[in-house]
Amino acid sequence: MVLDKRNEDILAAVVRDFIESGEPVSSGWLYEHHDFGIKPAMIRLILKDLDEAGYLVQPNYSAGRVPSDRGYEFFADYALRNTEPSHPVQELANSFERRAWGELLEELSHELGLLSAATMMAAHETYKSGLETLIDHFDWQSRAEIKQVIHDFEALDERLEGAKRELAANNEIQIFIGKKSPVTRSQYLSVVASDFECDGERMVLLAIGPKRMDYQKTAKVFKNLKKATSKKKK
């Protein structure tokens, strides 16, 4: 299925509204809260097409729809394409300039409500912060989910060491949904990653959180940091 702009906007609205509410999104809800210029019956047909194309899932016949992993992947890319950098978060920029990596990660976790991690390209050094923040912001469904996320946190140093060159290969912000992540195994997590440079020292920075993370805010923070560090290199 090739998505035109209207279908993209409707799919983005479904994912965004589900991220905010945690509730399945119906055609009636979309009609009441968004202006796509079409009637509810047409919205229902588009949702059905998006469902059949694998972007959405309908938990039961009478419920609205929720994003599949493919739907989250679409929205992550949509957020990156449609989010522009603005002014850097000054505390993050200052910590970056001072190479205060522990402070940087604490501030990043606090700003986004996610787990954050960093690994240095030229040294076997990994930093991580925010496990409690992630747990507090996660909509847990079972003990198994918690155990998997904690296991991912414990294994992060080794996995990052093995994956850092892959993560830094194209100098772009990358987003991995569920089990496509090279550094986590939980199907419930998403990972935002990109490489940065400070005074000739390269690092990979990650934000790790639930699939229902705020991708637009996370993309903006990463783009702001890239903007700040690129100015410093000049």
Image (cartoon, helix red, strand yellow):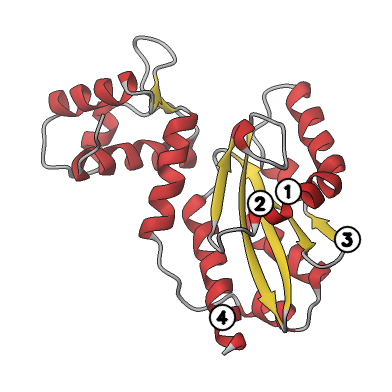
- Please tell me which of labels 3 and 1 falls first in the chain: 3
What label does residue 234 carry, if any?
A: none
Residue type for callout 1: Ala
The residue to which callout 3 is attached is 124
Q: Residue furthest left?
A: 38
Q: Quadrant of residue 204?
A: bottom right
The quarter of the rendered structure image containing the C terminus is bottom right
> Where is residue 5 drawn, in percent x and y?
21, 45
Residue type for callout 2: Glu
Q: Is residue 194 left or right of residue 73?
A: right
Marks 2/1: CA–CA distance: 5 Å
> Where is residue 220 drawn, in percent x and y?
49, 64
Q: Nearer the viewer, residue 83 or 39?
A: 83
Give the tally of numbered discs: 4
Element marked by disc 4: helix
Q: Residue at x 65, y 70 (%)?
A: 196
* Mark 1 vs 4: CB contact within 8 A: no
Q: Residues within 10 Å of mark 3 (few under 14, many from 20)?
A: few
What label does residue 163 carry, if any?
A: 1
Q: Residues within 10 Å of mark 2 (few under 14, many from 20)?
A: few
The residue to which callout 2 is attached is 166
The residue to which callout 4 is attached is 230
Marks 1/4: CA–CA distance: 23 Å
- Please tell me which of labels 2 and 3 falls first in the chain: 3
- Please tell me which of labels 2 and 4 falls first in the chain: 2
* Mark 2 vs 1: CB contact within 8 A: yes
- Marks 4, 3: nearer the viewer: 3
Element marked by disc 2: helix
> Where is residue 143 drawn, in percent x and y?
78, 23
